[in-house]
Amino acid sequence: MTRKAREIETLLLTMYAALPLYLTHVIRPLPVILFHVVMAGIALRVALGRGTELISPRLMRWLAVIYVPFYVIDVAIISRSAIAASTHLVLFIAIYQPIESMQRTNQAQRLLTSTLIFIASLATSTHVTAMLFVLTFAFLMLRQLMYLSHLDTVRAVSREYNASPSGRSAAYYLLGAALIGAVLFPLLPRIKNPFVQGLTSSLPGASSTLGDSIDFREQRVALPDSTLVARVWMDMEARPFFAPVRLRGPIYDRYEEGEWKQAAKGLRERGGRDGTFVIARPRGVEREAVVQLIPQRGMLLLPVGTFLVSGLEGKLYEGPAPETWYTYNEALTHFTVRMAYEQEPLRLTRVTPVSYPIRPEIATLAQSIVGDEARPAQRAALIERYLVSNFRYVPNSVPVRKPMTIEEFLLRERGGHCEYFAAGMAVLLTALDVPARVVGGYYGGRLNPITGYYTLRRSDAHAWTEVWDGTRWATFDSTPPSLRPGTQAVNLLREYLATLTDSVTFIWDRYVLTFGLADQVALLSDLITWTKESIATLRERLASDSRAVASLPFLTIAAVLIALGLVAILVARRRRPLFEALAEVLAQHGVEVNDAMTMDEALERLRREKPAVADTLMPLIAMYEEERFSAHSDARRAADIRRRLAELQT
Amino acid sequence: MTSRAVSSPPAALPTSGSGPQPPWEFKGVVRLTRIGTTYIISTVVLAVSAINTGNNALYIAVSFMLGCLLLSGIASKSGLSHLDVEITGIDEAWAGKPAPGILHVRNRSRVWNVRDVILTGDALAAPVLVPIVPRRGEKVVYSDFLFPRRGRAHVNRIDSYTRYPFGFFLKKRRLRIDSEVIVFPHIRSSESVEERFRAEKGEQTSVVRRGLGTDTHSFRDYTAGDSMRHVAWKKSANAGRWIIKQTAADAARSINVVVNPYRPPGTSDERFEEMISEAATFIFHAATRGVDITLSLPRVNVRARESESPEALFRALALLEPLHEPVTLDGRNAVVFAVGGGHHDAKSA
């Protein structure tokens, strides 16, 4: 590879490092576009053999001087973010350096700048494809480092540049470093500074499809969006009771000026211990689920029935609306919930119907549906059945002719999307003086058979109704079940591929992105527990039946223990090089031998200090020299040296 | 006179030890380079950021950077520790002049290729760059060696340095080698011995006797390489050692050089070496003139015929040790070299 090609590769490496900045939104796209245009211009000049001075170095120096105050302005006024302003600065430096390189050698600094851009890009990347970016960048960076190392070496001996082939070597070292990195990654202590909340990012799709309010006066069109919202894992025992999954989001329990809103009661921190928070009182069947989600604007979407949350990093807040939960952490979050078939509020709650202006026709309709039924839950069930049977569902993606009111939906159109069904049911119950509210969230999801979790995407956004039965809020869904999210026909192949891809991203999200100190402790704890249990089980079995010795589990454990013992013995008694063995003996006599010393030199030093010992060791060292420098290694001679060394040490 | 095949010593190269200390030389085994320092600082900063933020993407970067650092250390150490060097091909080495030789650099490692290795040492005229030594492979490098003094030179170490693979560390390992080279004395310019040749030419003219080339001219002690046909058996029997009969023609094309290794008290080593060097220079230029040369040293005479290489003479001079007791050498009809004792004047010494 020629110098020109290397220079172009360096420029492309820097440009490549900045590519994710378009996706991660650390900075606005314009500075990144500008950066890429200028760098491409420099690369083009180099390709044409005209050097890197796209902009005159003098002008560039002036721009650098001007940039210093500009950085402050950027932080304070333009970007209003130190991270964004620093990224702008690094991009400017990245442009400055190739132009400067015509005056002085700055290859190392340029690589450092590329690394800084890479880190800025990586810090907010959350998708598994970031690994491809990391590996490609690392490959190019290692190539550049090897090239730089080579260049420094040839300069040191005042030789001409002689390009060494480093592509294969870089790949070789990349593989090695990646393997070591993979081993180190779970072992690095996840000690988080409690005073720093963490780098958060405006993740792609972080904006919620769940609005703060529902306003039926406005046209609403929700396009299909496959952005992942959450994954919920539950075992086979939990599924009959809690599947399809229903993730609860905002609660619209106030009607005001034609708009369904959330009643603000203020923000309260929920007291918890060791990341465990009790949020309701359970009743009935209890099961567990594991939830992985990106809190949308800090909101935690909990499965319906959740009464306990554990494994949550950071604090949990209730509010501003009641029974909505926030962590104010926008990073991918992983936690466990316990769900009960029914759950009651922890404290006495006074519930009143929504202050919705009920028209007489609505009241008549409601009364006609429920008849003589007086129990709130039964009334709700009747209305739910009525709506499911007599109303048609119009998907969110199909715009109706014009926005319609709930009255129009109930009395005239008799069709609409899920929010109409939810709000219609709430209005009908309100007409009967039964407290009801509209709940926004996600419903259904697709079960991934490989990993056993339900994937909920934005397209699974849904609304349903909660009805107060006197002691608790009960969930009702008046949207026809066959038309709820996740019930559409799917392409099998696409589904299969989606499942596979999602499995990979799940593993990435679970075991890479959300791998934390709790996981490290859990891993260690599991290992200890497993060992203890295995030993206890074996002991019990052996006590009751001596033939258990021949059982497969016992033999497996015995084989593992024997293998570990053998490895330990081999490591302890491994054949150290003769040089090291001799060096150890010499060190005992005060002569430290290192790689920069020959045995002869060490012997000379020993002779000056301890001539008698030197005379003893001299024949051994002579034998070592003979063994080391003879054309053929003599195992007997080597063994003889080791034996004599052992004798000396004893 | 026909010229003889005597290779002329090449011009001297700058030695590796001259001038300021080269950038790769240092004490110890490993040195952190500037790139390495920058890299480590970056890793530490990134690790602090990762800890501060709990961002696992940064933890990935930190793990990978630590992996690179670790791998770099392992690769450079393992690479160098499996290197062996052997020196061959130094046929003629002259003190103070670069001598071409061959370095055989072998990599015994089954895993690591070693690249960009700098070899340096007291015996190497200049640092040698070996671009790559493949694993379980050998690289032959032609290099110049430089020995400052005549004699038996032991080359027993060569230092190897490498920055490979990423230039974070400059690693050093001293390689033990076992090589011996006979270094011939320093050869000066021909002007320094021209005077001697003028005197010798005149003497040769005067000593030429009439008669056939096969006529006996004189007798001398046997030297290695003399034909048995020229042994004067009667004289040998009388003397108790082999005596060679010299013809007039032989005498006209021959020079006897006597080097007296006696070093009087108070004389410096340098003066002795100068004398040896002068003798070697004389022999060197005599050899190029195509004459037979007999070198007389205490207890040994070495002869090089017109058609033979004078290597044996230089070897003898190379290994000549100073004597601290005066010796008597027959300096008749010979060019005599001695410390502080003149040259032609010493004929009767």
Image: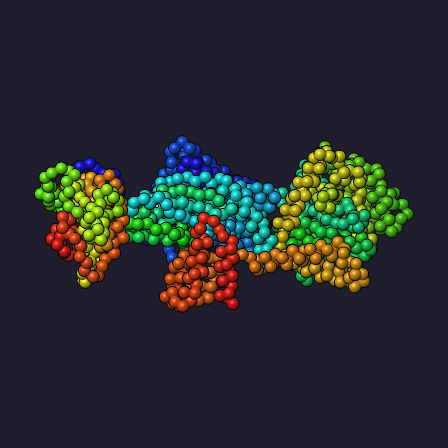
A102 left or right of A452 in image? left
Task: Please name whichever residue, B56 or A307, is drawn nearer the observer in this view of the structure.
Answer: B56
Q: Is residue A267 visible?
A: no
Q: Is residue A633 visible?
A: yes
Percent of width and height locating residue B321: 25, 56
Question: Residue extending furthest left?
Answer: B206
Task: Please name whichever residue, B89 or A601, is drawn nearer the observer in this view of the structure.
Answer: B89
A311 left or right of A409 in image? left
Q: Residue at x 84, y 50 (%)?
A: A377
A378 left or right of A100 in image? right
Task: Please name whichever residue, A205 or B282, is drawn nearer the observer in this view of the structure.
Answer: B282
Residue A131 lies in quadrant: top right
Percent of width and height locating residue A425: 80, 44
Question: Residue extending furthest right?
Answer: A372
Percent of width and height locating residue A281: 77, 58
Q: How many marks?
A: 0
**Looking at the picture, does residue A36 appear above or below residue B326?**
above
Q: Residue at x 84, y 44 (%)?
A: A383
**Looking at the picture, does residue A590 appear above or below residue A213?**
below
Question: Residue extending furthest top?
Answer: A48
Percent of width and height locating residue A486: 74, 39
Q: Residue at x 25, y 44 (%)?
A: B228
Q: Residue at x 61, y 44 (%)?
A: A128
In the rendered view of the protein, which quadrant contains the N terminus of chain A? top left
Task: Please name whichever residue, A444 or A49, is drawn nearer the observer in this view of the structure.
Answer: A49
* Colouring scheme, one of rainbow, by chain, secondary structure, one colour: rainbow
